[in-house]
Image (cartoon, rainbow, N blue to C red):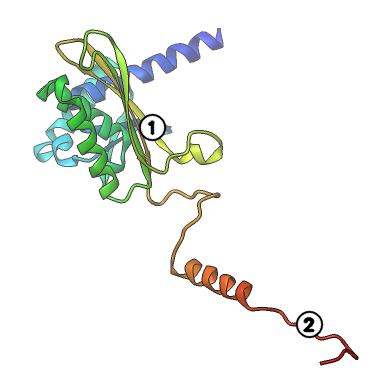
Amino acid sequence: MEEKKFVAFKKEELGVKEYIKRELGKGRISAVSIEYTPVGEKIIIATSKPGLVIGRRGEKIDELTRVLKKRFKLDNPHIEIREIMEPLLDAQLVADEIALLLERKGSLKFKVIAYKMLQEIMKVGAMGAEIVLAGKLPSERARSWRFAQGYLKKTGDPAKVVDRAMSQAITLPGVVGISVSILPPNAHIHDRIVVDDAMRSRIKLASVDKEIPIIVKKKGGRK
């Protein structure tokens, strides 16, 4: 019985998150999280465009609050906006942006869209990025295309710091699946070796020490 209640509770929570994302628009929302407090529900919306989400004088937030109370039976929802300062380092925002570009410009330009987005991600300082597109691109048969640059961990503990997200684009040939992985510039990688000026100087000193011959003098030997 408790398991059924938990499943129903999580289903309702997922419905709230999906409704907020759909209502506020694709490409604006990165993530929606819900925290339950004694005074009500705290809904945190991560977005790169807080002005568009809030609206003039907060009318969009007020309307969203009314819907959450009436439709989803939330007691006292409080909406909090968390601004994303660099949207190109957020995998969900990048995936949604690629989906919007494919829907707007067409699937035939998928290579141009993917390469340009990859360059912009690396330009803002990401250590590595990967974009995978799957669908009827550009032929009638579905296949996958991978675009990657930089350093990106796939397994082990370092892979946990990689930001991953998925999205979908509805194009004329069919649905295109979009997968984005980004390794942010501030990620801590244990096995990463940074070749800077200090390391170069140490390498030079070590090579010089190896070149210096070592002369061993024998006691009592003839000169």
Q: Residue placed at 63% from the left, 72% from the top?
A: 210
Q: Residue placed at 17% from the left, 24% from the top?
A: 102
Residue pointed to by mark 2: 216
Query: For the residue marked with disc 1, what is the amino acid?
Result: Arg
Res. 87 image quadrant: top left
Q: Residue furthest right?
A: 220
Above or below, 125 relative to 213? above
Residue pointed to by mark 1: 164
**Residue 28: assigned label:** none
Asked if one can make out residue 27 in the rendered structure from this viewpoint, the answer is no
Q: Residue placed at 48% from the left, 34% from the top?
A: 154
Label 1 – label 2 distance at C-alpha: 60 Å
Asked if one can make out residue 33 in the rendered structure from this viewpoint, the answer is yes
Circles 1, 2 touching at the beta carbon (< 8 Å) = no
Residue in front for this viewpoint, 207 or 200: 207
Secondary structure found at label 2: loop
Q: Residue 53, percent across and down?
A: 17, 35
Above or below, 130 relative to 221? above
Q: Residue 134, percent across and down?
A: 30, 18
Secondary structure found at label 1: strand
